[in-house]
Image (cartoon, rainbow, N blue to C red):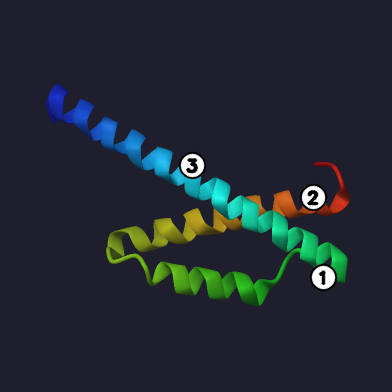
Amino acid sequence: MNDERLTEARKKINEVDEKMAKLFEERMDVTKEIAEYKKENGLPIFDESREKEVIKNNTNYIDSEDYKSYYTEFIQSVMDISKEYQRDRMEGSK
């Protein structure tokens, strides 16, 4: 990869990262709503069956077999962050 191609590839990464940041904020806004509902209704933060369902369903959106295992790790990380945020919201520390 020459310098120009590398620069262009990095530019595309930056554009994707910007979109992902906006989607992350959108997801966390919904996570806040979920935390409020769970707190009001005495529900636990962790729902194993829901997490398995999210991983299964979302992994189906990935066409490349090369990426599926990495995406599974990615979405698990996002859910872990969401649980941490819910915990903070429900315990009143944020």
Residue located 44% across and 45% down the image: 20
Residue 76: give x, y in percent of width and height: 55, 58
Would you place residue 54 above or below residue 76 in this image? Answer: below
Q: Are marks 2 and 3 in contact (CB under 8 Å)?
A: no
Residue located 12% across and 26% down the image: 2
User: Looking at the rendering, in which quadrant would you find the C terminus?
Assistant: top right
Would you place residue 80 above or below residue 7 in this image? Answer: below
Please, what secondary structure does the residue beneath circle 3 have?
Answer: helix
Residue 32: give x, y in percent of width and height: 71, 54
- Residue 89 is left or right of residue 12, and the answer is right
Which residue corresponds to mark 3? 21
Which residue corresponds to mark 1? 43
First of labels 2, 3 by sequence position: 3
Tell me if mark 2 has few (under 14), some (14-19) or many (20+) residues whose alpha carbon lies within 10 angstroms of its own.
some
Residue located 71% across and 63% down the image: 34
Residue 85: give x, y in percent of width and height: 71, 49
| Residue type (three-letter) at the residue carrying disc 1 | Leu
* Separation of residues labelled 1 and 2 (CA atoms): 13 Å
Quadrant of the rendered structure where residue 12 is? top left
First of labels 1, 3 by sequence position: 3
- In the picture, the disc for residue 89 is 2
